[in-house]
Amino acid sequence: MAEAPSKDQDLFTCSVCLDLLKDPVTLHCGHNYCMSCIKSCWDEEDQKGVYSCPQCRHTFTPRPVLFKNPLIAELVENVKKTRLQAAPPALCYAGPGDVECDVCTGRKVKAVKSCLVCLVSYCETHFKVHNEVNPGGKHTVTDATGPLQEKICSQHHKLLEVFCCSDQKCVCLMCLVDEHSGHKTVAAAAERSEKQKQLVETQRRTQQRLQEREKKVQELREAVETLKVRSEARRRNISGLSQKELSEGLLLQMDPVLSLCSSLSALLRQQWRTVRRSLLR
């Protein structure tokens, strides 16, 4: 059964949409409405030219200009915050990519913990039951961050808690005794932490190389632009000379220079795109 609305919520509830006020406006009669709700009501009364309060039926002529009431808006926001804090946590159903609670029936709730002894993932409610049945924290529990099967050895059904450096794979203690005897091993958690550090360092170096390339490309672009500006200036100077002072052939020699600048600029752009793609792979 739905909870009865509080007195504060009644006070700040729009009588048109029956929800908390949105962009609240206060009429001259003292009643509050959502701006969009009262506008819709008054739009229907445009033909009559007389506008009324939906609650007390007080009439207004001409149509009043509406302004948002900042004080009421602030009070409504406080009511919203109070409601969120007082409300019990809603069920968070598992979506795509989430780990489902193995105990829930019907629609599955998102799992928060996985027990590596029971080989079961639990939602918050069922995890409390698990702890009541197994007091003392004797079971190994992890956050439900991925399919439980990925953390369990498919051969021995034990936790993959050791990383075999020789074979570059996670193994269980039974595997360590059998197939991986004598191999160099470390704790899986330690290896995971090391891999994460390596990934961060690789990303840092890649970003540094990318910035260095950007700087070099920018310098080349500036050099090309400078050459183009100088070539254009020289071309204008040459164009102003008479034929007696300059042969026609000298003027034509400037075209290949400008063409080279354009080609070089296009080549730089193409190389930059290629370098950027290779660095970001």
Image (cartoon, rainbow, N blue to C red):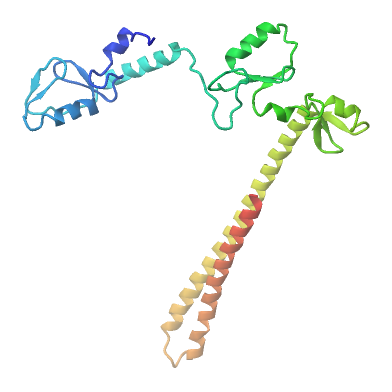
Q: Nearer the viewer, residue 169 or 94?
A: 94
Query: From this viewpoint, which residue is outermost toward the bottom?
Result: 244
Residue 281 x %, y %: 65, 50
Residue drawn at 50 percent across, 72 percent down: 230
Q: Quadrant of the N terminus?
A: top left
Residue 151 x %, y %: 73, 28
Residue 16 x %, y %: 23, 21
Residue drawn at 25 percent across, 19 percent down: 14
Q: Judge from the rendering whether residue 9 lies leftward or rightward of residue 39; answer left or right.
A: right
Answer with the quarter of the image where residue 176 lies. Answer: top right
Residue 253 x %, y %: 53, 84
Q: Nearer the viewer, residue 155 or 140?
A: 155
Answer with the quarter of the image where residue 113 lies. Answer: top right
Q: Nearer the viewer, residue 83 or 205?
A: 83
Q: Judge from the rendering whether residue 104 lies leftward or rightward of residue 209; answer left or right.
A: left
Query: From this viewpoint, which residue is outermost toward the front?
Result: 106
Examine the rendered structure and indicate whether residue 8 appears above or below residue 265: above
Q: Nearer the viewer, residue 261 or 155?
A: 155
Query: From this viewpoint, which residue is outermost toward the right?
Result: 182
Q: How many numbered badges does the structure rendering display? A: 0
Residue drawn at 64 percent across, 27 percent down: 145
